[in-house]
Image (cartoon, coloured by chain):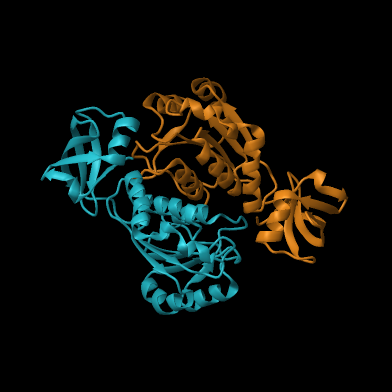
Chain colours: A cyan, B orange
Amino acid sequence: MNLLLLEKKDFITPDRVLISGRRFEHIQKVLKAEPGTLLSCGLLNNKMGTARITRFYADSLELAVTLDMDPPDPLPLTLVLALPRPKMLKRIMESVTGLGVKQIYLVNSWRVEKSFWKSPVLEMENLEKYCRLGLEQGKDTLMPRIYQKRYFTKFVKEELPIIGHGTLCITAHPKTSNICPTSVNKKTTLVVGPEGGFIDLEVTTLEEAGFKPFSLGERILKVETATTYLIARLFS
Amino acid sequence: MNLLLLEKKDFITPDRVLISGRRFEHIQKVLKAEPGTLLSCGLLNNKMGTARITRFYADSLELAVTLDMDPPDPLPLTLVLALPRPKMLKRIMESVTGLGVKQIYLVNSWRVEKSFWKSPVLEMENLEKYCRLGLEQGKDTLMPRIYQKRYFTKFVKEELPIIGHGTLCITAHPKTSNICPTSVNKKTTLVVGPEGGFIDLEVTTLEEAGFKPFSLGERILKVETATTYLIARLFS
């Protein structure tokens, strides 16, 4: 936790908060903070600043909060991800949020196991929990928007061209010799397939929607590694 | 598994192998391969090629093997990693091996929990198991060399200058305004600290050994994400 992420309901006066539960325990046991300690903090979807610990109670603590800084700029990236297996999804939500991604589409594809869609991880409350960890890690306050799309073809044909309009449109696909560009640093829509990759028909459907396939060379990466790798490569 | 990784003991004749256990189950259940199916394969620390399935038995299968290709070039990177918590270590071993890293030093540092050094994951046989998964994922045959160094100062003062000689020497450190270079594509020795970062004294010791601290900007990444991110950034 590099940033204490606050919500409106934490405030007991306009500049004082009372924190209990997971955040309290982390501040007490991991950060080993004491009264007087200054922590980075931020209000969810709002400003960032500092919080000074004023008082410890048995299972909560009080902090005096100053919010005077803007959160870091969002990454100009929309990430479209074939739904990964739930355990990996948790980590990806946390890591891409920590990297500054603000638009995430979870989509179906041929090689996505049907059972993944039934996972409780997909409940919005749970997804936001992992994103929250990413915000605390990456020192940010802006919660990403997450959309779930169960119909690949309909989504790619009808919605994706609008989402990708005016952006660099990329499909990450190991089976092509076009190597992914570096340091593009402009608005990008990146589509990442499932483990095992998109099937040929899906790659063609994406191409017809304006998404050119690019690979990362001869090595094939796991979805989790590929996602971080692509973001680093595109925005460096 | 994008490559069937073979060992000498798998060979029953100079060009035929018999596979059982985990690899057999993966080929049968995940890849759903049949007699005649061609798979990418490679002999550990040796050539790569193709394997054609010739026969299925109840709990094993036989393949005819041709080894006629070199494995991909290693990444010109030596990775020095403050020992991460065991669960994360497993994933990092797999991912950096999949990315082509061939020299890995696991080192102690102030913020490494002592208990991590007692984990069974650190037994060489176990570390190699995760690296093997990385080779199968990344389509490579060259097993990384892994070294464990329990004394930070002694290692950094006596060994690291020799390891880093003639290479670009970098410490990844969030608390500096020097931003990490991109696309260096030359021999590099990269030092990555523990969660919470190196303490100031460690950063100074590393600087005295020729390792300049660089950050990745205002966002702070988890060790696992940072490692992949740095590799993508340095070698793109």
Q: Is residue B181 above or below residue B122?
A: below
B83 vs B49, nearest the viewer: B83
Percent across and percent down for residue B53 are 79, 61
Q: Is residue B142 above or below residue A102?
A: above
Percent across and percent down for residue B63 are 81, 57
Q: Quadrant of residue B193?
A: top left
Q: Residue at x 46, y 46 (%)?
A: B225
| Total marks placed | 0
Q: Is residue A25 above or below residue B156?
A: below
Q: Residue at x 53, y 34 (%)?
A: B80
Q: Quadrant of residue A175?
A: bottom right
Split into 4 quadrants, where in the image is the N terminus of chain B?
A: bottom right
B147 vs A35, nearest the viewer: A35
Is residue B36 at least partly visible in the picture?
A: yes
Percent across and percent down for residue A3 are 29, 42
Percent across and percent down for residue B15 are 86, 54
Is residue B73 at least partly visible in the picture?
A: no
User: In this image, B215 relative to A219: left or right?
Assistant: left
Find the residue positioned furthest to the right. B13
Q: Residue at x 54, y 47 (%)?
A: B185
Q: Is residue B220 above or below residue A205?
A: above
User: In this image, A86 relative to B135: left or right?
Assistant: left
B207 vs A4, nearest the viewer: A4
Q: Quadrant of residue A176?
A: bottom right
